[in-house]
Image (cartoon, rainbow, N blue to C red):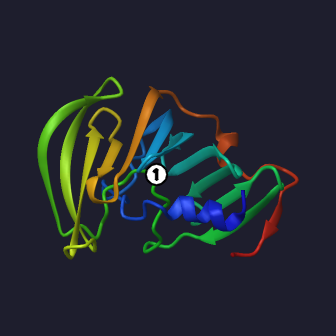
Amino acid sequence: MSLVSALRLGCLLVASLAIVPAVPDAAEFSAHMVLKDGLATTRGRVFIKGDKMRHEFLDAEGHTVTIVRRDKKLLWVLLPQERTYTEIPLRLSTRLPGQFLHLPPEALHRRKVGQETVAGLEAEKYEVLLPGGERGSLKQFFWVSPKLGWPVKMSCPEKQIVVEYQDIREEPPPDRLFELPPGYRRQGPP
């Protein structure tokens, strides 16, 4: 997979950011991630450990890993088949790739609309209006697990996008998953 393709997928869901104002320090879990974009489905894995996040996916173009290190104020996009990575500074205004589900801080409106079970966890369902979309605002739905302190599903009907975490394992992922692997060489931004 090319770096440009990897960054495009990572930014595919830029509107699905920051559902909770800050990353809960207690969140420690891993899950399978399913992204449905129209008729296309992409599968991956997500790992969360406090303010550290990792997403891995494999598609027709190859394997890509995204690591978010808020403590270092960095985001890394790794291309394992090329043994390369790109480093992106993480600022307060930096939007995380969409596979890391968060309520958007730029939301115009947010309201709780129900409660459902997602991936075996009780979840509070929120309707969120964001700036943009065909009518000036874009409606999205987020399912937030109070037990995890984290969203486990997002749906954007207008764009026909759904991201869902499945097979959630509530245990701390190994620290090594949030580090750059040895032997990788840095590339500049695309």
> Does residue 54 appear in this view?
yes
Q: Nearer the viewer, residue 103 or 99?
A: 99
Residue 130 lies, with reference to residue 141, above or below; the image says below
Residue at the spot of label 1: 100
The C terminus - image quarter: bottom right
Residue 70 visible? The answer is no
Would residue 116 appear left or right of 106 to someone viewing this image? left
Q: Quadrant of the N terminus?
A: bottom right
- In this view of the protein, which residue sits in the foreground, 90 or 7? 7
**Residue at point 65%, 47% (across, down):** 178
Q: Please identify the residue farthest to the front as the structure is shown.
A: 39
Q: Find residue 120 and report its image quarter.
A: top left
Give the vertical position of 119 relative to 75 (above or below).
above
**At x 54% / y 59%, what residue is drawn?**
10
Q: Amino acid at mark 1?
A: Phe
Q: Secondary structure at mark 1?
A: loop
Residue 17, horizontal then vertical, whole percent: 38, 60
Q: Residues within 10 Å of mark 1 (few under 14, many from 20)?
A: many
